[in-house]
Structure formats: structure tokens, C-alpha cells
Image (cartoon, rainbow, N blue to C red):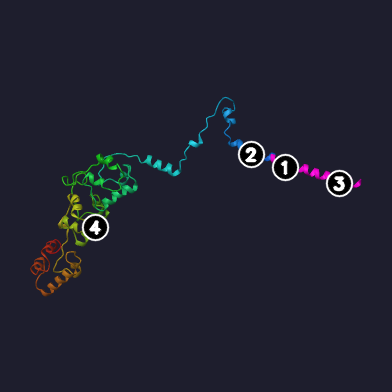
């Protein structure tokens, strides 16, 4: 009988343990189902509290919510580009493409890089003689030339010497770099070249000497020639009979070889004054060189 009682107690303990396990499993199932209900409640398409109540919590007033799917995000870069486009409002005004500044070109609608291309063209000696010349600038955006061509002013530089730019042509032997930059078609590059040529020669004798500069040709010189003049009295002539070998050879029209020939001629004719006429007599240089040397030696 005692044995039967011990077995019954053991069975009772097992039954109790099973009951506890069942209760725990049921509790876990209920917790899991509650969590899923909460998640589904946030995304379900059914009616929500806001749609059943007004903006103040009263029924009957629906609240208009923005359609998130229709809103298009705008990046900072897109907004900046739009602002730049809006800020670059074209302002048309009368302008001379040979004189217009970078800032003025930008106000007409060009970007900084596009405007700089125009300035680079002028600094290298480019001159706009017709409106069509301006249209050949490769950096101009589509439609820009058609938009501004009626606003361009191009005075007839050949007919109006110095009109709207200089009252009188600029004298090259007395001009400085700033005065040269005022001439349409002369930028920093050619201004420095002109001053270097003038220094090397001892003065300019005629406008055509500018063709001796690198990059200058008759097509580039023709539009700016009406704005220029030279005064040969400002050239300080050297005494050909006393000039040193260094002074002679430094002249671009003489050079070391002819300079040595002149020095040898003076040594052979110690009692004769060697001048341009004597050089011609002894055929030391050609007639074309003699014509140029007359401006610099006596």
C-alpha cells in the first residue's frame, strides 16, 4: 500500500510539471501574437484614428495628409544649380566685344569659363571686326549669339580712326603697357611683345615692324593699325663709326656676323668715317637692311 502511495505522488509531480509547461507555452504564444498585431496595426490599410477624427480629435472632420509617395526629394546640388540658373539672369545692353569685360559677359549669360575664352582670344591679339567674328567663339552656348547680336556695337575701325576708343592714335615710342592695353586687339601678350621689340631696336620706325613679333600677321595688324602711330624723332641714333661690337650685334637687323664685318671695315679704313653710305658702297649689307638701319645709325 505504501508502494502504491509513492507511485501516485510521483505521477502527481509529473502532472504538475506538465501543467506548468503548458501554461508557459500558452503565455509565449499570446505574447508573440500581440506583438504581431501591433506591427500589422501600424502598416494596415484600414481606417486609422486620424481619419476617423478631426484635427482636434472630433469625428467628422478628415485631415488632409500629404501624399509621401508623390513628394520628390530635391538634393542640395540640384537646388544650387537651380539657384545659379535663376541668378544668371541675362541682362541685355549695348556692348563692344573688343572692350567688354568678363563681368559684363557673365551678366549677359555666359559662365566665368565661357567669358574667359573671349578674353583669352583678345589677349592673343584677336579682334572682332564683324558680328559674325564673335559667333565663332567656340565657348558660346547655343542660342547666345542670336540673343545678343543686336546688342553688339562694332565701330568701323578703318573709317573712324580712334572713334569711341581714342581721340588720337597712340604713339608707340612713348606709350606704356597700360596705354597699349586700351587698344582694341592688344592684350597683355602683344603689349609685352611691342615693348620688348621697341627696347631691342631702340625705338619703332614704322607700324609694319610689328609684323616681326611672333604671332603677328597682316590680318591681326590691319584692325589695330588705325589706332597706332610712331614718332621716329624719339629714336636715338648711334654713331656707326663709334658703336662697339656689342652695340652693333645687339641690333636685330645686324647681328654678330654683320657687326664683325663693320668692325673689320673700320679697321681697314681708319682714316674714313664709316657710315650708312659707306656700308652701301662696300655692300656690307643688303639694300633692304640699309633702309632699316638708317633709322638707328648715322
Residue 284 at x, y percent in the picture: 12, 69
Residue 22 falls within the magenta-colored stretch = yes
Circle 2 residue: 36
Residue 69 at x, y percent in the picture: 50, 37
Q: Are marks 4 and 2 in contact (CB under 8 Å)?
A: no
Mark 1 against mark 2, which lies toward the viewer? 1
Alpha-carbon span between mark 4 and mark 1: 98 Å
What residue sits 72% from the left and 40% below the top? 26
Circle 3 residue: 7
Going from N to C along the chain, the mark reached first, 1 or 2, is: 1
Alpha-carbon span between mark 3 and mark 4: 122 Å
Going from N to C along the chain, the mark reached first, 3 or 4, is: 3
Mark 2 against mark 3, which lies toward the viewer? 3
Circle 4 residue: 193
What residue sits 13% from the left and 74% below the top? 267
Circle 1 residue: 25
> Which residue sits furthest right?
1
Q: Is residue 62 above or below residue 280?
A: above
Residue 252 at x, y percent in the picture: 19, 64
Position of the N terminus, as image quadrant, is top right
Amino acid at each position: 500500500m505504501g508502494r502504491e502511495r509513492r507511485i501516485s505522488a510521483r505521477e502527481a509531480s509529473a502532472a504538475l510539471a506538465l501543467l506548468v509547461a503548458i501554461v508557459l507555452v500558452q503565455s509565449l504564444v499570446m505574447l508573440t501574437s500581440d506583438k504581431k498585431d501591433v506591427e500589422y496595426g501600424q502598416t494596415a490599410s484600414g481606417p486609422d484614428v486620424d481619419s476617423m477624427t478631426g484635427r482636434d480629435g472630433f469625428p467628422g472632420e478628415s485631415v488632409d495628409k500629404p501624399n509621401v509617395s508623390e513628394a520628390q526629394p530635391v538634393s542640395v546640388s540640384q537646388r544650387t544649380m537651380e539657384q545659379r540658373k535663376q541668378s544668371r539672369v541675362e541682362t541685355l545692353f549695348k556692348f563692344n566685344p573688343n572692350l567688354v569685360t568678363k563681368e559684363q559677359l557673365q551678366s549677359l549669360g555666359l559662365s566665368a569659363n565661357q567669358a574667359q575664352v573671349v578674353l583669352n582670344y583678345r589677349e592673343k591679339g584677336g579682334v572682332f571686326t564683324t558680328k559674325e567674328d564673335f559667333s565663332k567663339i567656340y565657348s558660346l552656348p547655343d542660342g547666345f549669339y542670336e540673343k545678343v547680336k543686336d546688342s553688339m556695337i562694332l565701330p568701323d575701325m578703318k573709317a573712324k580712326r580712334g572713334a569711341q576708343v581714342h581721340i588720337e592714335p597712340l604713339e608707340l615710342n612713348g606709350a606704356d603697357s597700360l596705354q597699349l592695353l586700351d587698344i582694341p586687339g592688344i592684350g597683355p601678350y602683344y603689349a609685352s611683345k611691342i615693348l620688348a621689340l621697341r627696347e631691342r631696336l631702340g625705338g619703332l620706325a614704322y607700324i609694319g615692324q610689328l609684323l616681326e613679333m611672333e604671332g603677328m600677321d597682316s590680318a591681326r595688324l590691319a584692325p589695330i593699325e588705325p589706332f597706332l602711330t610712331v614718332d621716329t624723332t624719339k629714336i636715338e641714333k648711334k654713331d656707326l663709326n663709334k658703336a662697339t661690337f656689342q652695340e652693333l650685334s645687339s641690333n636685330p637687323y645686324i647681328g654678330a656676323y654683320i657687326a664683325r664685318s663693320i668692325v673689320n671695315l673700320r679697321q681697314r679704313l681708319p682714316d674714313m668715317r664709316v657710315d650708312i653710305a659707306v656700308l652701301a658702297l662696300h655692300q656690307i649689307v643688303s639694300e633692304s637692311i640699309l633702309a632699316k638701319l638708317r633709322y638707328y645709325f648715322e
